[in-house]
Image (cartoon, rainbow, N blue to C red):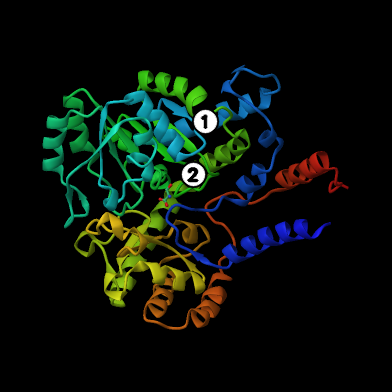
Amino acid sequence: MNEMVSKIIDIVRKHDEWRHSTINLIASENIMSPLAESLYLNDMMHRYAEGKPYKRYYQGTKYIDEIEVLATELMKKLFNVDYAEVRPISGTTANGTVFYALGGCGKKALIPPVQAGSHVSHTKFGILGALGIEQIEMPYDKENLNIDIDKAIKMIEEVKPAFVVLGGSMYPFPHPVKEIAEAVHAIGSKVVYDAAHVLGLIAGKALSNPLDEGADVMTASTHKTFPGPQGGVILTNEKEIYKKVSRIVFPVFVSNHHAHRLPSLAVTALEMIEFGEEYARQVVRNAKALAEELNALGIKVLGEHLGFTRTHQVIIDVSDRGGAAELVKKLEDAYIITNKNLLPWDPPDAIANPSGIRLGVQEMTRFGMKEDDMKEIAKFIKRVLDGEEPEKVKKDVVAFRKQFQEVQYGYKMNEEALTRFKEYITLSMGIDLVK
Ligand code: DSN
């Protein structure tokens, strides 16, 4: 093996070991179950399957067709919806598809303010802007960390947007779907709910399903609180929307849709049907426990008067500690992975050193952590924020994290899956692991 190959292998090995020894609090990430992860490695990654199941442009897709239909049906069952489109390869792709279906060049869309958590794809900098749709920010209530309902309704009546986007990336408190949907429907427009962050909490019924509250279509990625493979999904009960988005996702936004992720998506949907409620309940309990302990330790947590959080996210304000930029690096040095985040009152140009740090507890919950463990995490964070040497904190973080290595709320590897895994390697790579 030449040196460069060794280097590549070493980079991957180091990444895997490192991230499994850290406390990962990135709110948009998660980990699949061992069974779902093992199924991710399959030959479908090499294939094309353009079009819809059983109506493809190439031959060789009969098992891809079967798994795509199965994954679609399981997602429909899990979310109790009439239509699911699993081909978008990311949440952004799902958003682009829906925005194109509902809007298009010259139309207007209302979105939550960028500093208050809109995802980049909702904005003029992302796919919304690329489609020529005008971004208009809804009025925001900084005190209640949510859309200002009365002012937003007034704006909806005046602007008459083609659609309104709810949901976002900084999202401790769910947006008021019912009230906004009533106003939007009164002008004949649509509500798009971007559930990327909270899809797993909706699946587990810790949050109500926005489609039951009046949203017309829900987009999401499938790898945040929903602990599946990286990908996207579109869910709706409206046949017309489904027909439109299905005609747009291919050929506009994807040619091939990376079918190797679909077996893992199907397994994750099954797991969420079986364990989703227990998992989602624990995620929200853990987020509250983390917020309460951080607050008790003297760290400013947003939304105290609102109970700190109703999702997987906890947002802390570190403006009185010099801003987030340096602190997130120190946390990383202590093996606590987080991201710096604008807060609703930050100016847009504070992006390099914003006031906030966003924390998400979903992945650590999957590794079996409970409320008491959140208190430990809060103490580690406090030590770093107070200026203790990250290297010292890291030692305790790594020892603590070692106790949580097995993924919960999902299927373990079984004999059947292990045999398939070995057979795949034997077949595909010519290395006989079977005997
Ligand atoms: N960038 C992701 C997040 O962290 O929220 C969303 O795609």
Tell me the tag on residue 277: none
Quadrant assignment, res 359: bottom left
Q: Which is nearer the N-term, disc 1 or disc 2? A: 1
Quadrant assignment, res 388: bottom left
Q: Which residue is mark 1?
A: 87
The answer to whether marks 1 and 2 mark residues whose Cβ atoms lie closer than 8 Å is no
Asked whether 272 or 334 is in front, the reply is 334
The secondary structure type at the circle numbered 1 is loop
Q: Is residue 209 visible?
A: no
- Crowding at dot 1, Cα within 10 Å, few <14 / some 14-19 / many 20+, comes out as many
Q: Which residue is mark 2?
A: 272
| Residue 219 x/y as whole percent | 39, 36
| Residue 92 x/y as whole percent | 43, 39
Q: Is residue 18 visible?
A: yes
Q: Amino acid at mark 1?
A: Arg
Relative side of 299 to 359, left or right: left
Residue 154 vertical placement versus 116 (above, below): above
* Residue at (45% x, 62% y) in the render: 25
User: Label 1, label 2: how many angstroms apart (C-alpha)?
Assistant: 20 Å
- Crowding at dot 2, Cα within 10 Å, few <14 / some 14-19 / many 20+, comes out as many
The secondary structure type at the circle numbered 2 is helix
| Residue 100 x/y as whole percent | 37, 26
Relative side of 203 to 173, left or right: right
Q: Amino acid at mark 2?
A: Met
Residue 64 vertical placement versus 271 (above, below): above
In what quadrant of the picture does the N terminus appear? bottom right
* Residue at (40% x, 71% y) in the render: 326
